[in-house]
């Protein structure tokens, strides 16, 4: 995908994630091709063609921007098959909606996977594929209703029969958060002036804005706000150029202290990271988690989790700045573990606190699954921006809700 297309597309993390699950050769890849009306996934008569999950970003009417995820068959066998199944299971944490594909009346594996998805609270759409060739669709239909309390749709990926019904049902199952959870429009509306203070440090790509800044600007423009941008050193000049103080100031968390000192009394203040804590996660849980900073001691170990995978940078906020701030307050003996991308420990019991990035590269369901894991382990969890506001003593003075 070239840069032009990337810039013009909705980020994958903000798309509806629809994962297709089923046994090998159940027709999952063919079903994706039928839904997208493209040869998106490789189709073969041989079971096990799909290895790693395949992500395809699409605009599908009437769903809008989506990601369709083609997974390996969960009945795969052998050493390689076990690895494939593990990667299929990882997809369950980010799936907003699951399509469970049935192609026979043996539900040995489907029972296990439907139970996994139900425990996660994932909406499930049951689909009986290959309806044009099966001679027992009525039996399969009745068994699905009886054993899973799901109402299946009979389709044929080959002829296209029933595909429109799938799209209609996906609209019904779409989580409310996709239509209700804006980034910043709960703080600023039509004709409100919003000042974005955006330091362009070593972490900002040359000639580019980072993703949270771009998404926040778009969200504010959709709400008809008047958006003005500046770097930290130009903030005073930007304020002087305005007739009235801005309704809202949004900044990078790492300059919270500087911006707070320059902020007009009437202006609300928050950060991109705090906004994304609310947009992608549970802001209440993050604020509660930040309180654990007060009880940290030098013998504790904390976990810093970032969504991006990149080489450490001199000014890296997660790998350098936050640990430095914590050790200055707690002591140099504080231990810090750092994970990135999809790496996240199964066992969290060793940690006194988890500090997560804004999660702009993850979808909300995946971030929420990490929060749930932390709560189940009784480990407090917070977010970069909330943690920095706590460490600088202004958490009660910024907008978090």
Image: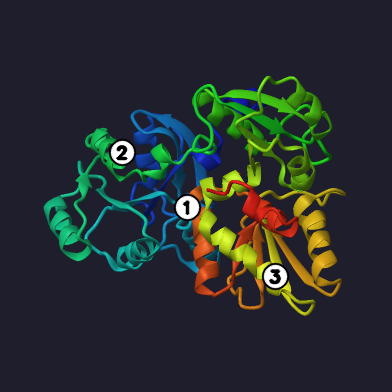
Residue 357 seen in render: no
N-terminal of the two: label 3 or label 1? 3
Residue 233 in picture, x, y percent from top left: 84, 32
Q: Reply above or below: 79 against 127.
A: below
What kind of element bears circle 1? helix
N-terminal of the two: label 1 or label 2? 2
Query: Which label sits in the foreground, 3 or 1?
Result: 3
Q: Reply above or below: 333 against 365.
A: below
Q: Residue at x 14, y 53 (%)?
A: 136
Of 79 and 123, nearer the camera is 123
Q: Residues within 10 Å of mark 3 (few under 14, many from 20)?
A: few
Q: Reply above or below: 125 against 250.
A: below
Residue 215 in picture, x, y percent from top left: 59, 33
Residue beneath label 1, please? Answer: 365
Q: Residue at x 27, y 64 (%)?
A: 107
Query: Which mark is drawn over residue 266?
Result: none
Residue 106 in picture, x, y percent from top left: 25, 64
Mark 1–mark 2 distance (CA, rounded to whole Å): 17 Å
What kind of element bears circle 3? helix
**Quadrant in which the N terminus appears:** top right
* Location of residue 59 by image quarter: top left
Mark 3–mark 2 distance (CA, rounded to whole Å): 45 Å
Residue beneath label 3, please? Answer: 294
- Do residues under tags 3 and 1 come within 8 Å of each other at their CB atoms? no
Query: Which mark is drawn over residue 171?
Result: 2
- Do residues under tags 3 and 2 come within 8 Å of each other at their CB atoms? no
In the rendered structure, the answer to whether residue 377 lies left or right of residue 116 reads right
């Amino acid at each position: 995908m070239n840069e032009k297309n990337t810039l013009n597309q909705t980020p994958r993390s903000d798309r509806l994630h629809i994962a297709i699950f089923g046994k090998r050769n159940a027709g999952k890849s063919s079903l994706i091709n039928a839904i997208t009306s493209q040869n998106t996934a490789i189709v073969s008569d041989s079971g096990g063609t799909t290895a790693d999950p395949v992500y395809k970003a699409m605009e599908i009417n009437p769903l809008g921007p989506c990601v369709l995820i083609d997974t390996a068959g969960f009945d795969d066998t052998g050493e390689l098959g076990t690895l494939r199944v593990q990667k299929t299971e990882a997809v369950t944490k980010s799936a907003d909606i699951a399509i469970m594909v049935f192609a026979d009346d043996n539900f040995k594996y489907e029972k296990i996977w439907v139970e996994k998805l139900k425990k996660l609270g994932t909406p499930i759409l049951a689909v009986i594929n290959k309806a044009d060739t099966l001679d027992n669709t009525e039996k399969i239909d009745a068994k699905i209703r009886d054993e899973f309390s799901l109402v299946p749709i009979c389709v044929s990926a080959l002829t296209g029969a029933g595909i429109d019904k799938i799209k209609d049902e996906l609209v019904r199952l779409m989580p409310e958060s996709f239509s209700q959870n804006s980034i910043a429009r709960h703080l600023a509306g039509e004709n409100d002036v919003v000042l974005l203070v955006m330091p362009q440090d070593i972490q900002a790509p040359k000639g580019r804005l980072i993703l949270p800044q771009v998404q926040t600007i778009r969200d504010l423009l959709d709400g008809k706000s008047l958006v003005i941008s500046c770097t930290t050193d130009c903030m005073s000049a930007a304020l002087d150029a305005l007739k009235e103080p801005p309704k809202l100031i949004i900044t990078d968390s790492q300059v919270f202290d500087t911006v707070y000192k320059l902020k007009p009394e009437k202006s609300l203040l928050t950060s991109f990271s705090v906004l994304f804590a609310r947009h992608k996660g549970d802001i209440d849980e993050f604020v509660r988690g930040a309180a654990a900073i007060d009880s940290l001691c030098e013998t504790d170990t904390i976990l810093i989790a970032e969504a991006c995978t990149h080489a450490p940078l001199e000014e890296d906020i997660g790998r350098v700045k936050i640990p430095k701030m914590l050790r200055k307050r707690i002591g140099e003996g504080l231990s810090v573990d750092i994970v990135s991308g999809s790496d996240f420990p199964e066992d969290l019991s060793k940690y006194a606190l988890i500090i997560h990035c804004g999660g702009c590269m993850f979808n909300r369901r995946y971030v929420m699954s990490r929060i749930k894991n932390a709560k189940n382990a009784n480990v407090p969890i917070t977010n970069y921006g909330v943690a920095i506001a706590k460490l600088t003593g202004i958490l009660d003075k910024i907008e978090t809700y």
